Amino acid sequence: MENHIERRSSCRRQRVVLFPMPFQGHINPMLQLANILYSKGFSITVIHTNFNSSYKSNYPHFTFRPVLDNDPKDNNLAKLASKGIGDLLLGIMLLNQCGADSLHRELEQMFVASKQQHEPIVCLITDALWYFTQSVADSLKLPRIVLRTSSLFCVNVYASIPLLDDQGYFNQADSVFYEENIMSPDDTSNFKKTKSSKPVLNLEEQVPEIPLLKVKDIIKMRIKGQEDPTGKLLANMLKQTKASSGVIWNSFTELEEPELKKILQYFPVPCFLIGPFHKCFPASSSSLFEPDRSSMSWLDHQSPSSVLYISFGSTAQLEEQQFLEVVHGLADSKQPFLWVMRPGFIKGLEGTEPLPKWFLDLVGERGRIVKWAPQQEVLAHKAIGAFWTHNGWNSTLESICEGVPMICSPFWGDQPLDARYVSDVLKIGIYLENGWAREEIASAIRRVMVEEERDEIKKRTKCLKEKVNSSLSKGGSSYESLETLIGYISSF
Ligand code: UDP
């Protein structure tokens, strides 16, 4: 690809400016998209917050410009991040409220430079959550294209939040109740919605407004209604996405065909499903953590399809009690495992202090623990039999692309929605939907790794993997959509 990139650079005419949201799951797809556009002949400028921008040195062919918190000594966002993802999200909302002037100034300076270089800036591509960038782009008469880094299904559910709220699904007390309890199915039967005048539902019941979902899937999103800060953030995101010049999705038509119809009705702008991006350019170069490559040589010594890979992404945190259930479930399953334990992934702790000595002995026999893994390579390794995931959208796509069945343990946001889609629509994973009980964990691991059920799941994952490959090949849906996108951007 290097030579390919070099060859094209001499004839660049147009520049695209991209602005990722500073979280791993958002940085990866934006930088992959930047590489795709670069390989198609565009010059690339990435504007970024000072916070979470350590990946820059891996992209010498891009221009980088800091905005919003652009003083390298300003570590306000980092401080918010260390308090938890909730505080960090509030910081991001604040930047959405007060970032317009700073971005406007920065873009004006870029216009001057691009004129001198005879390389016009043709459009701004920003993460959907940077909704404030729409008014800035409008004021500069610059087309803004949105990158949405989640599934289409998730956005369709977000679009229904006002309706679901009116029906009383987001009762605040209920959400708190759900978060604070590791529930068994029995616990959920008395769960009542109090805000609505509708008859009482329990958590296991199907949501009539979105039949793919159960009531508990909505509660697990941890949104407390349309007036809640997250609800407002999502409403703004949807409104400003509708006002944009187009939406790029890291998904492919064959994966979410029924959802695409709804999306096309909802957004009156061109939509481009050109994913999965990481099949064109891997995520490793935009990693904020150093991957431990020793896991690869360990995998080389394991039998085919024998290892369970466990990772809950870059922000999810387990309670200590839940963590110990995982430890026991894993031990009882008797399966080999590779487990990513990010520093800080047990709530309130930096390290893995609660790990019992007997479990460390078990790790010596049939397991491996790393702080961060080269995930895409791990999933592509023949020793991997299943992926126990939090169903972040990138992880979900990466698993699908390698034909690896999943065990789904979502935490919040879009994750419970994607978990439901993976288990009930695609039927390529087992949803651990009742919390973190060790018996259920051990049973789910055995179902997906060794029992008869595994063959059917494996067949479906293989079939989906083939669909990914054909969608990215010449004539396939993602391939053609990318060609259309390139033509569209070039026409600005
Ligand atoms: N990832 C990785 N190594 C790890 C864990 C995660 O490289 O040990 C990458 C993973 O491949 C994915 C991203 O981090 O591209 C996580 O994004 P995702 O949307 O799955 O979850 P999030 O971190 O946003 O919750």
Image (cartoon, rainbow, N blue to C red):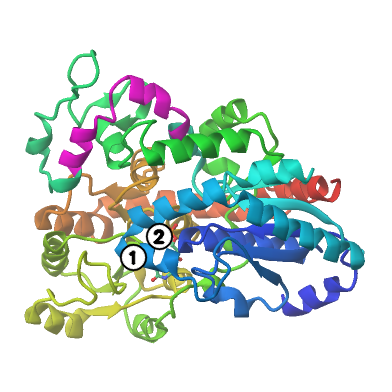
Secondary element under disc 2, as helix, strand or loop, is loop
Task: State which tag comes first along the sequence, 1 or 2.
Answer: 1
Residue 9 position in % (x across, y down): 84, 72
Give the side of residue 339 with respect to residue 178, left or right: right
Residue 333 occupies which quadrant of the picture?
bottom left
Marks 2 and 1: in contact by CB < 8 Å? yes
The relative height of residue 314 versus residue 419 in the rendered view (above or below) is below
Residue 344 position in % (x across, y down): 27, 70
The relative height of residue 13 versus residue 299 in the rendered view (above or below) is above
Instruction: Report whether the residue tagged 2 is closer than 8 Å to ligand 1.
Output: no
For the image, the number of numbered tags is: 2
Give the side of residue 484 with respect to residue 177, left or right: right
Q: Residues within 10 Å of mark 1 (few under 14, many from 20)?
A: many
The relative height of residue 371 versus residue 315 in the rendered view (above or below) is below
Look at 14% across and 82% down and name the residue there: 360
**Quarter of the figure with the N terminus:** bottom right
- Disc number at residue 404? 2
Task: Inspect the magenta stretch and tell me whether residue 166 lies in it.
Answer: yes
Residue 11 position in % (x across, y down): 90, 68
Q: Amino acid at mark 1?
A: Gly
- Disc number at residue 385? 1
Secondary element under disc 1, as helix, strand or loop, is strand
Give the side of residue 454 with respect to residue 403, left or right: left
Foreground: 116 or 277?
116
Task: Inspect the magenta stretch and tell me whether residue 111 lies in it.
Answer: no
- Disc number at residue 58? none
Q: Magenta part mainly helix, strand or loop?
A: helix
Ligand 1, image quadrant it occupies = bottom left
What residue span does the magenta drawing correspond to? 158-178
